[in-house]
Amino acid sequence: MEVPTHVTIIMDGNGRWARQKGQRRLYGHKAGTDSVRACCEYAVEHGIRYLSLFAFSEENWNRPADEVAGLMELMFKSVLGERETFRKQNIRFLVIGDRSRLSAELLRNIDMVQEETAANTGLTLIVMLSYSGKWDILQAAQRYADDCLAAGRRLPLDETGFAGYLATAGIPDPDLMIRTSGEQRISNYMLWQCAYTEFYYTPVLWPDFRKNDLEEAILSYNRRERRYGKVD
Ligand code: IPE
Ligand code: IPE
Ligand code: MG
């Protein structure tokens, strides 16, 4: 089995999972953290280099205030709660997204754990938080424009150069994108980075997603032929 270098997951279906159980949406979000743990374990066991997880989109800020607050609190606790696992499993932890919308307390925790794990050489676990693909492309364009202004001229730019301005700079593009809960759309995720990503959709709701589901996605990926526009 060929293991993809970078697997990314749109973790979707927490709300529906909770509703099926007659519970509030936050109950589903909390249950989803077990799925995150299972996927990290699988990634470590199988030598996946990068696992990125779409945890909260720019558009998700438009959800009811109590759900947003609950999700941020869950993130706050999870970041602290997993420090020991990151140390033991040699995991490098990164958060990518629009930091300007996150609270100072959450940012403090994130920065602390990022620094603590910066030298770890195993799995790179990336949480995409307050992230959207259009936001990323726009902030990259703005930073490129700033550099041009500073240089007093239009600086040369190619695809590799532009990717260096994206929030995901230095991280290889996803090989496999998994979306749970049966939705078959990209929902403003890594628009630039997914240009040649293989997509895998499963009806499984995120809180039910386990190692065997991840393995099934990777087996499907193995049956694909990636052509990049060529003929052989
Ligand atoms: C995914 O589950 C988690 C986030 C988007 C934060 P949802 O909350 O979107 O669950 P559904 O899609 O309503 O079931
Ligand atoms: C995408 O899920 C965002 C995350 C999983 C974090 P949504 O549930 O927000 O997407 P839509 O609204 O169904 O497109
Ligand atoms: Mg959803």
Image (cartoon, rainbow, N blue to C red):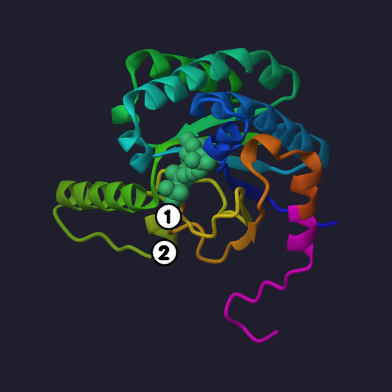
Real-space Cα separation, disc 1 to disc 2, in angstroms: 6 Å
Residue 94: horizontal and vertical position, in percent? 53, 31
Question: Is residue 71 in view?
Answer: yes
Q: Position of residue 108 (x, y in %)?
A: 41, 14
Please state which amino acid type lies under the numbered disc 1.
Ala
Which mark is on residue 159?
2
Classed neighbour count for the residue bearing mark 2: other residues with Cα under 10 Å, few (<14), some (14–19), many (≥20): few
Residue sitting at the far bottom: 231
Q: Residue at x 74, y 24 (%)?
A: 89
Which of the pair 149/221 is nearer the observer? 221
Badge 1 marks a residue whose secondary structure is helix
35 up-or-down from 79: above or below:
below
Q: Is residue 72 above or below residue 177?
A: above
Q: Categorize mark 1 by other alpha carbons within 10 Å: few (<14), some (14-19), many (20+).
A: many
Q: Position of residue 73 (x, y in %)?
A: 46, 17
Residue type beneath disc 2: Glu
Q: Is residue 26 magenta?
A: no
Marks 1,2: beta carbons within 8 A: yes
Choose between 11 and 44: the one closer to the eye. 11
- Residue 223 falls within the magenta-colored stretch: yes
Q: Which residue is mark 1?
A: 163
Left/right placement of residue 24 relative to residue 226 reads left
Q: Residue at x 78, y 63 (%)?
A: 222
Residue 33's tag is: none
| Start-end of magenta stretch | 217-232
Left or right: residue 75 versus residue 20 is left
